[in-house]
């Protein structure tokens, strides 16, 4: 199991201390995407035998998913140095995901499809809302019902039963990442053809589709908004390399722009970040793109850029707080519109402690750029808010102390080490 340190767990008091003002210069190497690997781990349940995943990031959420899979009967081993996870899946699985794990990580819901497909039933504790919004499951449920499952909520658990799922056409109201993945994993061994229309097209959805195809699934339209799945009898385990993390890549790109530095991001897929890189170019950054790396350099104060978050290939909501931090120190005013998570602006109250001028109204934020921010104690309210606060701390005058850093540990592997190598003055203080 991982040794991420005590801050990785709720209720502990580690903080990150940053003294702002240094330019970040150098290289960082990306590992696999959090939002892909967790689903790939869940997908492993679909095939008895040994699945091996590479480029697994060293983050807390991987540990939580490993614990959940172990609870369901799988044997999970992790080689931290190699970034590899091996999952040995038994013929017979338990079908219940308990509240104590689900409440720690919403992505636990991704075992719903595989458990229903493998066991004919699934009991998953309801994840509830979180710091970024209410996050319903209605599209997951409606799709599974179309495929013949009976779904009910009892005693805080979502209970789904289906002897064998059958294919159906499902029109999603919204291209939900989670619902697309649940239905995809349920459909690959269902009887007949399933069509998921208005499917999510995020690179992480494409990654899981590729892995399922490697396992023997028949999926047409991968990467488009219409997925056509012809159910097969059984899948076989595979070795698969996780797609690289575009959100971590985007976070480093913003760090380079904000600190007027120059960062080369390697093991990257720059084509997954086109809008974000275009925004940085508009802000004044110089961007050099290579097939599996890119460099962002900046030699002046950025210009503010307007942002509208949308499903992929639109601007990612998971980079919205980082771009608010950028706009907070840029020249001019900008309008940021958040269309995915209604509570994702909560963190601007923390950013205001550093002197940022951000006014929110519903799902819009008006950011008036300030020439400087000043260090202060702040609290990370979720992973990406935490990243936004780290970026702001890097340019703020004096000391910024970030509390509740377990949120950042959930999604960013080795961030402090990378920041120090790039020249930042940052350390973890164990409380
Ligand atoms: N929604 C519903 N009903 C549903 C499903 C979704 O109303 O049945 C709503 C949600 O409440 C939300 C919107 O649809 O307002 C988008 O939700 P989606 O299902 O697309 O997102 P998700 O699967 O819950 C994943 C990532 C998020 C990322 C979003 C959008 C994982 C574990 N999480 O969430 O990542 O922001 O897709 O790209 O893959 C993060 O990493 O910080 C993070 C929050």
Image (tube, helix red, strand yellow):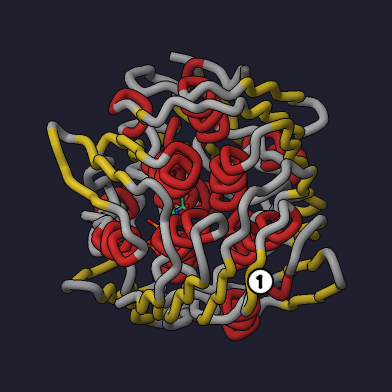
Please name the residue shown 44% across and 30% down the image. 406
Q: Can you tell me which quadrant of the image ligand 1 is in?
A: bottom left
Please name the residue shown 24% across and 61% down the image. 138
Q: Is residue 83 left or right of residue 45?
A: right
Give the x, y percent position of residue 301. 58, 73
Q: Residue furthest bottom?
A: 282
Q: Nearer the viewer, residue 227 or 36?
A: 227
In the image, residue 203 above or below residue 3 = below
How many numbered discs? 1
Q: Residue 153 sits in which quadrant?
A: top left
In the image, residue 238 above or below residue 93 = below
Please name the residue shown 18% across and 46% down the image. 152
Residue 54 seen anywhere in this rendered image of the structure: yes
Give the x, y percent position of residue 427. 58, 28
In the image, residue 431 above or below residue 131 = above
Q: Residue 85 sits in which quadrant?
A: top right
The residue to which callout 1 is attached is 272
Q: Residue furthest left?
A: 155
Quarter that holds the C terminus: top left
Q: Is residue 366 left or right of residue 422?
A: left
Q: Nearer the viewer, residue 178 or 408?
A: 178
Residue 55 seen anywhere in this rendered image of the structure: no
Q: Nearer the viewer, residue 142 or 417?
A: 142
Give the x, y percent position of residue 289. 81, 75
Q: Residue 250 sits in which quadrant?
A: bottom right
């Amino acid at each position: 199991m991982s040794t991420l340190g005590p801050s990785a767990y709720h209720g502990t008091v580690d903080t990150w201390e940053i003294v702002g003002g240094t330019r970040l210069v150098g290289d960082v190497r990306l590992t696999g995407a959090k939002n892909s690997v967790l689903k790939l781990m869940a997908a492993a349940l679909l095939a008895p035998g040994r699945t091996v995943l590479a480029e697994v990031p060293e983050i807390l959420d991987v540990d939580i998913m490993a614990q959940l899979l172990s609870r369901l009967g799988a044997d999970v081993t992790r080689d931290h140095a190699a970034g590899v996870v091996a999952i040995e899946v038994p013929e017979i699985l338990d079908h219940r995901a308990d509240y104590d794990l689900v409440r720690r990580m919403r992505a636990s819901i991704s075992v719903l499809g595989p458990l229903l497909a493998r066991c004919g039933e699934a009991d998953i504790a309801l994840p509830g809302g979180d710091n970024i919004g209410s996050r319903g499951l209605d599209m997951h449920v409606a799709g599974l019902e179309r495929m013949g499952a009976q779904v009910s909520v009892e005693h805080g658990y979502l209970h789904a039963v289906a002897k064998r799922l059958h294919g159906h056409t499902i029109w999603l109201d919204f291209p939900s990442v989670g619902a697309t993945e649940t239905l995809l994993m349920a459909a690959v061994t269902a009887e007949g053809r399933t069509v998921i229309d208005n499917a999510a097209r995020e690179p992480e959805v494409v990654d899981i589709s590729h892995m399922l195809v490697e396992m023997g699934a028949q999926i047409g339209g991968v990467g488009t908004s219409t997925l056509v799945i012809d159910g097969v009898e059984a899948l076989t385990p595979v070795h698969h390399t996780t797609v690289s993390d575009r959100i971590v890549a985007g976070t480093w790109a913003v760090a380079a722009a904000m600190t007027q530095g120059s960062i080369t991001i390697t093991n990257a897929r720059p084509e997954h970040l086109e809008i974000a890189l275009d925004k940085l170019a508009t802000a004044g950054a110089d961007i050099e793109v290579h097939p599996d790396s890119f460099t962002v350099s900046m030699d002046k104060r950025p210009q503010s850029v307007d942002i509208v978050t949308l499903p992929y290939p639109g601007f990612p909501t998971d980079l919205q707080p980082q771009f608010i931090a950028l706009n907070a120190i840029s020249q001019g005013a900008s309008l940021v519109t958040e269309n995915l998570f209604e509570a994702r602006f909560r963190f601007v109250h923390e950013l205001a402690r550093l002197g940022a001028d951000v006014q929110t109204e519903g799902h819009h934020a008006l950011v008036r750029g300030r020439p400087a921010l000043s260090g202060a104690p702040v609290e990370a309210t979720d992973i990406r808010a935490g990243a936004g606060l780290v970026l702001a701390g890097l340019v703020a005058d004096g000391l910024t102390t970030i509390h509740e850093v377990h949120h950042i540990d959930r999604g960013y592997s080795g961030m402090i080490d990378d920041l120090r190598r790039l020249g930042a003055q940052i350390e973890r203080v164990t409380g």
